[in-house]
Amino acid sequence: MSTTTPTPAAAPAARKKVTTRTFRQKKQRGEPITMLTAYDFMTARAVDQAGVDSILVGDSLGMVVLGYSSTLPVTMEEMLHHCKAVARGASAALLVGDMPFMSYQVSVPEAVRNAGRFLQEAGMEAVKLEGGRERAEAVRQITAAGIPVMGHLGLTPQSVAQFGGFVPQGKTAAAAQRLIEDAQILQEAGCFSIVLESVPAQLAELISQQLAIPTIGIGAGVGCDGQVLVIHDLLGLYDRFTPKFVKQYRTLHRDIVGALAEYKAEVEARAFPAAEHSIYMDEAEWNLVTRNP
Ligand code: KIV
């Protein structure tokens, strides 16, 4: 870390706190809702300062931060640890914590208890969980406890083993019909919003029109009420794999590797640190040292 005096960044204009009510109002006004993932303090600050409506501390954490090959190994403790950092970095965005695999599937009381930990211990304001009709009772009980729930349908990554890979969902008429029903069931169970992941654009648009609550799409076309992306994908930070539905706005992994290689070359060539990165003693003081060894 630099030891020079940091230049204070211009304070971003304070904006109004985003809540689940804001989500509803934006849908009613036909204004797109923006959401991005973040997993740490600095990224949360950047997303918040960019004016994005909501931050999802996704269990994609497992893949893009912790290096697992799926989201399945992510634990409650790992999620809470990263949620706390995000909560310290963001002030206006609505904060949604993603419930990890096996934190809500075993029993409804366990789901309620774990959902509560996201708010009570980690500063989140809502939770997200994956699945349709099979999760309706958990959604009902979590919302009854006063915790806003975001649903997640389509390519739900915690079911990747069941799907046989990261493949789009809802592409047959029967599968599409089931997704339409699931979306209705989740709305009736109390979800304030639903993520639609990797489903045909026509289907996502139809579901969005049918629901009173906002849909947030990822790989689900422009007809959703909002959009979410994994921030590492958007910034080009994750070099292992980029889904077809991602637009890379930057190629930061390449930039980082370039910067690090420059650093290595300059250290090896003794070009870094230069005089301006070094501290010098006053000459008179230094003379006392060299004259009296
Ligand atoms: O974990 C995550 O980042 C997600 C988004 C892809 C919606 O669930």
Image (tube, rainbow, N blue to C red):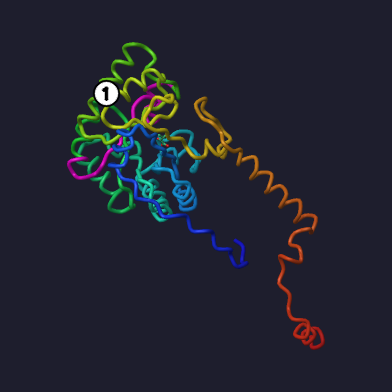
* Left or right, residue 201 beside residue 134: right
- Farthest residue in the top direction? 173
Residues 112 and 204: in front is 204
Q: How many marks?
A: 1
Q: Is residue 146 magenta?
A: yes
Q: Is residue 121 above or below residue 239?
A: below
Q: How far from the left and from the top, in percent, is residue 104?
A: 27, 37
Q: Quadrant of the N terminus?
A: bottom right
Q: Quadrant of residue 142?
A: top left
Visible residue check, residue 151: no
Residue visible at 61% across and 41% down in the picture: 253
Q: How far from the left and from the top, in percent, is residue 76?
A: 34, 45
Report the magenta residues as a range.
Answer: 143-164
Q: Is residue 17 above or below residue 220?
A: below
Visible residue check, residue 51: yes
**Residue wearing tag 1:** 182
Asked whether mark 1 and ligand 1 are closer than 8 Å, the reply comes as: no
> Callout 1, which amino acid?
Asp
Q: Quadrant of residue 99?
A: top left
Residue visible at 33% across and 20% down in the picture: 206
- SS for dot 1: helix
Q: Quadrant of the C terminus?
A: bottom right
Q: Quadrant of residue 236?
A: top right
